[in-house]
Image: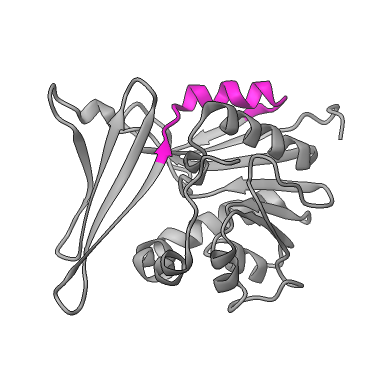
Amino acid sequence: MTSSDLWDDDAAAQYDDTSAEMFAPDALDPAVDFLARLAGDGPALEFAIGTGRVAVPLTARGVRVSGIELSQPMVDHLRRKVSADEVPVVVGDMATATVPGEFSLVYVPWNSIGNLRTQDEQVRCFQNAARHLAPGGRFVIELWVPGIRRFPPGQSAVPFAVTDRHVGFDTYDMVTQQGTSHHYRRLDDGSTRYGFSNFRYIWPAECDLMARLAGLVLEQRVADWTGAPFTSDSESHVSVWRKPMDAAS
C-alpha cells in the first residue's frame, strides 16, 4: 500500500484551476522544451501524470508519452484532453507500477516524488524509473529544496505563497522529514477553502544516493527548467540521472 495522499473527484476537478500558475507559458514551456530535448526520438514516461499538465503539450511536440497515476479521477480529467491511444496511462503507484516497453526518458515534475512519504518508497521510485529506462536513458525530477533554513527557533511553519487569493505554508517535522502543505484560497463568493497535502522532503544529496542505489549516474543539476545554475541559494532543482549504456535492460 502506498503512503501517498489519494486525489479524489473534488480535488481532481479543481486541480487545473488551483494550479493555474503552473500552466502559464512562462512556467510550462521551459519544462516541455527541456524534456523534449532529452527524449529526442524516444518515448517518455511520466510518473504522477495527473491531468496531463506536462504530458499533453509534450505529446503535441511529437514525443510519445505514457504515464503512471495513482488517482483514477485525475486520469478521468486527463481523458477530457487526450485519448488513451494518444497518452496511455497505468493507474497505480509510481514506486511499483509498470508500463510495457523501454523509455528514453522517465520524469517526475513539480515535487511529485515527495508524495511518496517513506524513504523506502522513494528509493523504489528511483529503481522503478531505472527499470523502465533503456540503456543511456535519463531520469529527471523537478523538486523544491526544503525551506528549513528559514526556520528561526520556535517557528512551526514556512510560507510559500501570500497573495490576496491564496495563502500557503508548509509545516515540517525535521526528525522524520515529513511535511504538510496548507492552502487557504479565497473563492469568488468571498468564502475560503482549505486544502492540504502531505509529503516527505528530500535533499539533493539524498536524491543522488537513491539514484546510485538504482544504478543511475548524475548527469546534470540546474536550478530550474531554464537551466539556471544550481547554487546554495537555489530553492528548487531539476536533476538528471543517466542509465549507463552498459547497464542491463
Instruction: Choose between 94 and 232: the one closer to the eye.
Output: 94
- Residue at 43% x, 36% y: name it: 229
Q: Position of residue 8 (x, y in %)?
A: 47, 62
Q: How is the image coloured?
A: one colour
35 or 172, nearer to the observer: 172
> x and y percent of residue 54 in the render?
55, 61
Task: Kindly identify the residue that appears in the image at 70 percent across and 47 percent down.
Answer: 105
Judge whether residue 69 is colored magenta: no
Tell me: residue 27, above or below residue 145.
Answer: below
Residue 52, located in which quarter of the rendered image?
bottom right
Quarter of the image for the C terminus: give it.
top right
| Residue 52 visible here | no
Left or right placement of residue 11 versus residue 85 in this view = left
Q: Residue furthest front?
A: 1
Q: Quadrant of the N terminus?
A: top right
Residue 129, how many percent across, how many down? 69, 39
From this view, report whether residue 201 is shown above or below residue 104.
above
The reply, left or right, for residue 193 in relation to residue 16 is left
Residue 98 placement (x, y as % from top left) = 75, 47
Q: Nearer the viewer, residue 220 or 146?
A: 146
Q: Residue at x 73, y 65 (%)?
A: 88
Q: Residue at x 31, y 27 (%)?
A: 173
Residue 14 shows up from this direction: yes
Which residues, given as a range, are shown in magenta?
199-218
Q: Quadrant of residue 121?
A: top right
